[in-house]
Image: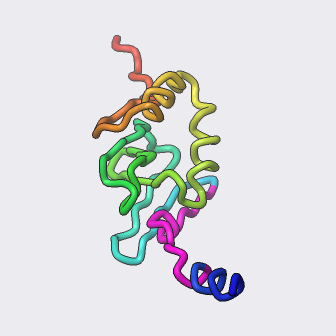
Amino acid sequence: MMNMFQQFFKKRKRKCPEDDYIVTITDTFVRVEHPEMKSQVVLWQSLNEILLINTDEGPWFPDVWLCLIGNNSQCFIPQGAKGFETVYEIVSKYNGFQFENVGKSMACTNNAKFILWKKAEPPSE
């Protein structure tokens, strides 16, 4: 009898929405793909800003996103997607990364944006 229940629940296991995202990380770029969306690519060298964006859409949709903003592009990586931790590990080493905003994001249950890093402006002459 127990085996029957295990089989039933095993087959009914719900897939996480983050599982549909494919994150590709190279020395040159980060690409995020989803079967129902256009691919997003940001070149590392064009990166200007990094955010954590919280939404109130979970658990049916991802509710924490790592957003990489480049010169003419951006990509959004949901927390829990394969590759999120790798990208986070890379960007958290950037000079001026604001770890305190990561903590604020993790404690937040509202829609909010948290700046983690911003490219330094060149000094004016």
Q: Which colour scheme is used?
A: rainbow
The quadrant the N terminus occupies is: bottom right
Query: Measuring 37% from the left and 60% from the top, which residue is drawn there?
Result: 61
Which residue lies most toward the front here?
A: 1
x and y percent of residue 29 in the render? Answer: 53, 55
Quadrant the C terminus occupies:
top left
Above or below — where is 24 with respect to 64? Answer: below
- In this picture, residue 77 sits left or right of residue 37: right
**Bounds of the magenta span?**
10-26
Residue 5, located in which quarter of the rendered image? bottom right
98 over 3 or under it: above or below = above
Q: In this view, does 34 lie above or below 2?
A: above
Is 94 inside the magenta-drawn segment? Answer: no
Query: Residue 42, percent across and down?
Result: 45, 53
Q: Is residue 83 left or right of residue 38?
A: right
The answer to which of 116 and 16 lies nearer the viewer is: 16
- Vertical relation: 24 (above or below) 76: below
Closest to the observer, 112 or 86? 112
The image quarter containing residue 108 is: top left
Give me the residue at 38% from left, 44% from top: 69
Count of marks placed on residues: 0
Asked if residue 11 lies in the magenta stretch, the reply is yes
Pick whichever, 92 or 8, lies toward us. Answer: 8
Measuring from the top left, give residue 110's x and y in whole percent.
30, 37
x 32%, y 50%: residue:
72
Residue with the most extreme top position: 125
Horizontal and vertical percent for residue 74? 37, 51
Q: Is residue 120 left or right of residue 2?
A: left
Task: Name the residue located 51 percent from the left edge and 44 percent from the top edge.
Answer: 45
